[in-house]
Image (spheres, grey):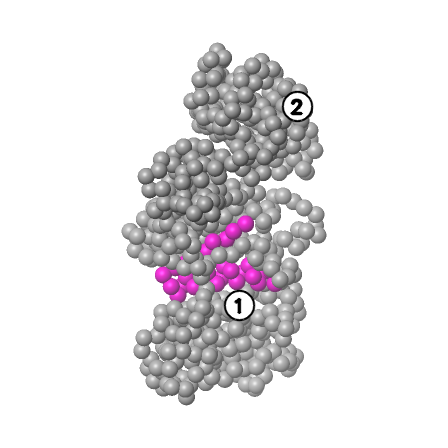
Amino acid sequence: MIKQLKNKHPDEIPADDYLGLGDEAENPKATSCGGVLARLLLDEVLSPEVRARIRTERGIAVLVEAPSAAWVSYLRGALADLAAWGHIEVRDGSSRYKRKPEDGAALADAVGAGLRVAVVCHAPEAHVPPAFIATADMRLRLGRPTVSLVEAAIKTVTGEAPRDVPAQVDRLDLSDLLVALRSGAGGAAACVRRLERAVTSGVKSSTPLRDVPPIHDLHGMGPAGDWCRRLVEDFRTMPADAFWREADRCCVISGPPGVGKTSLMHSLALTMKLDLLETSISSWFEGSSYLDRTLAALVAAFSGARSQGRSSRGVILACDELDAMPSREDGGDERHTSYWKPLQQAYLREVEATAAAGVRVILIGATNYAGRLDPAILRPGRFGRVVHVPKPDAIALAAILRQHLGPELPDADLSGVADAGLGSTGADVTAWVKAARRAARIAGRPVMLADLAAEVLPAEDRSEADLWRCAVHEAAHAVVAHAEGSGRVQRVSIVSIGKRGGATMVSSGGAPTLGKDGLQALVVAALAGRAGEAEFGLGASTGSHDDLAQATRIAASIRVSFGFGGTLVHRADMDRAACLLEQDRTLRTAVGRDLDRGYAAALASVRANRDLIGALATLLMERRVVDGADFLRLVEAQGMAPAPAAGMTMEASHG
């Protein structure tokens, strides 16, 4: 077919031959409902200049991006009616038109022969050869149908002008519209009634919002909460067009599990009255890990949000588990790289397209491990920044407790329970309140403060020997941190929460910047729990797992992040410094020596302060929790003075 057409001007080619090579696709009639909708949708992006180019330009290559796979074949028909083509391809991922991006020989032949070529696809990065995407003369991105478009379609199909078309028609896919817009079945009024039923029948493109407080009433969200509140105020005070062009509307929310990252995004959507669309890296692999299907799911998530944003007040796209996408800096063997590289490239393109000025999408990522993110996605024009959700302090914990309790215990002082639960998360608070209500319900009485206290400080099921090991471990962390000037001890606890048997919280007590000595003091404090167990004859245990990870991260960052390792070369941010150890044997050996020296210093500090550690461990066995004031009183009683504070917050744990 190409040989028959290649030397002819489009005006000399029979019209039937313009429908492509082989049986590319059926040409849905323009007078059908689907054909009408497709023509109107295409008309919305065709200026007179673009229309003239499509109809007359020799050898033009056009890529048409459909709102969804359902539109693809109908848009092909609309293109065929608009102009004469030498080759039109449908790429919708279906069994009939199944093509991988690398299956582009026929397309390349057609373009190379100088034919006028069009490709229609809902997810080009997943189905269209990259070379065609890069070299296409025109890319037409079609949005979802608007109310005015649906009104025009109803008038065309029924001959009657409709009234009161529901605003939510942008949430319907083509199949829903085809069922509703039937000619000869009650006219325009019946079409509108069917549209209303379709909109309210559960056809949804947004996530049902959780029962959460508005953003200004949400407690314990730290810098991430501040960012969200600023965004809400910008949305309230800026003109809509200016907000979507200029506002700081993209970020990654980072924090440990359970601190409320997802609740924060739901609260933001509730406060701004915007639809919330949720996706995740893992969801793109559901059902199949084949590259083309995963790419299609990735592209659909972002392009769907952009499309819905264009036809509404805007949307929030929440993308979870960002750390599941490997960083390009982590390397890997060629086999894995050949799989991940197309995904990473498409991911960066889609993030950039979604974060672009004027796009009506608030783009928020979420991760538990910010250090694993590819730095490329944090550049301006993409996610842009990381904002953190910390574990709540005692004041925030009390406020979260009050929110969850509602009208229960209205006059109770919750500060004692909050102090005892310091180091816990909002998810822990939810579990405490549910369990307290269950206990009260079984007892046949209202909830009492003692019910909450019993959940925050549950009865111990560990042996005395295990409790003593935990107490010594945490006491050693606290005393050595104080002695080395690593910070101010806020709280020492041997309360078991989840897999963690105890915790020591040390807050920043000095300047915001650290020298090499200050960083090394943090390493010594992190290794002190293990040193304490050894000095008290308990032997090493798995309780130092998190401590070793923290000490290794700091020790690696001394060498590769802060220029204290014999070179000024910056190789990685602090959160990613330890990732280099697996592949760099020389660095691994050097960091190992640094950790050995840090452990020796921790052991020496433990031995020098053995009596204080023993006294604190004994107090922990009695009380289970020792706050900062009581810790200092114990220190003063022992006559110990601290070194100058280093100035970085640290949390050590025994797990």
The residue at the far front in this view is 444
| Lateral position of residue 480 relative to residue 536, left or right | left
Span highlighted in magenta in the image: 293-321
Of pointers 2 and 1, the one earlier in the residue sequence: 1
Provide residue 38's location: percent of width, then percent of height.
Answer: 46, 76
- Magenta residues: mostly which secondary structure? helix
Compared with 155, 265 (above or below) is: above
The residue at the far top in this view is 639
Provide residue 386's location: percent of width, then percent of height.
Answer: 47, 43
Residues under numbered marks 2 and 1 in contact, where contact means CB atoms less than 8 Å apart: no
| Amino acid residing under circle 2 | Leu
In percent of the image, x 50 and y 59: which residue is there?
302
In percent of the image, x 54 and y 82: which residue is there?
27
Compared with 417, 155 (above or below) is: below
Q: Residues within 10 Å of mark 2 (few under 14, many from 20)?
A: some
Q: In terms of depth relative to the viewer, which is nearer, 392 or 27?
A: 392
The residue singled out by tag 2 in the image is 538
| Lateral position of residue 67 relative to residue 107, left or right | left
Quarter of the figure with residue 150: bottom left
| Amino acid residing under circle 1 | His
Residue 122, label in figure: 1
In percent of the image, x 58 and y 15: which residue is there?
610
Q: Secondary structure at mark 1?
A: loop
Identify the image quadrant of the C terminus.
top right
Compared with 307, 266 (above or below) is: above
Compared with 238, 157 (above or below) is: below
Identify the image quadrant of the N terminus.
bottom right
Q: In terms of depth relative to the viewer, which is nearer, 337 or 287?
A: 287
